[in-house]
Image (cartoon, helix red, strand yellow):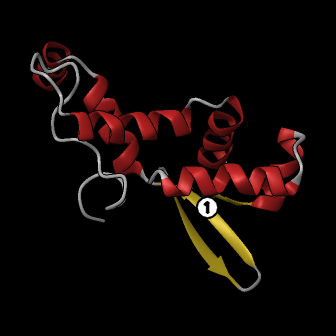
């Protein structure tokens, strides 16, 4: 995967906390990814997938813990996948989802103030 996120949702190069103005297009891309995460059910999905034994899960694994219908869970997974937060792998009739670590790390990096980043690296 090139950069962070998909080509459609590539993360901006400049952090909104870097001390310089962020370009409108970059702000819109970052806001789209953050909007995908902002739903409580989607945050739960990310957590469930990350904590799954193999670090991946199918819709049938995710539906019971959320107490949501299969179409609703599939809808949330599609949004997270389009935002570049999840990868989807089709195996037979099942699709399995796993986190895209580079996207998650990219979001954390963009939202960490520069002084905090320098301190973290110095340790």
Where residue 88 appears, as percent x and y from the top left, is: 57, 67
Task: List x then y, in percent, for residue 5.
Answer: 36, 53
Describe the element under mark 1 as helix, strand or loop: strand
In the displayed structure, does residue 4 sit left or right of residue 36? left
Seen in the image, is 111 located left or right of residue 76?
Answer: left
Q: Which residue lies furthest to the front in this view?
A: 24
> Which residue is tagged 1?
97
Q: Position of residue 76 (x, y in %)?
A: 68, 48
Can you see residue 53? no
Please identify the quarter of the rendering in which residue 100 is found. bottom left
Q: Which of 117 and 52 is in front in this view?
A: 117
Q: Which residue is drawn at 61% across and 61% down?
A: 97
Q: Relative to 103, does residue 56 appear above or below in the rendering? A: below
* Quarter occupied by the N terminus: bottom left
Q: Can residue 43 be seen in this view?
A: yes
Above or below, 66 relative to 123: below
Residue 123 versus residue 105 in the image, above or below: above
């Amino acid at each position: 995967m090139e950069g962070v996120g998909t080509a459609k949702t590539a993360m901006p190069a400049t952090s909104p906390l870097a001390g310089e103005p962020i370009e409108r297009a970059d702000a819109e891309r970052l806001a789209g990814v953050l909007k995908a995460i902002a739903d409580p059910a989607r945050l739960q999905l990310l957590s469930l997938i990350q904590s799954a034994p193999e670090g991946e899960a199918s819709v049938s694994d995710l539906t019971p813990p959320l107490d949501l219908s299969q179409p609703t869970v599939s809808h949330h997974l599609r949004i997270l996948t389009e935002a570049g937060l999840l990868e989807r792998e089709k195996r037979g009739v099942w699709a399995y989802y796993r986190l895209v670590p580079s996207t998650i790390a990219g979001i954390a990096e963009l939202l960490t103030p520069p002084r905090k980043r320098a301190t973290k690296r110095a340790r």
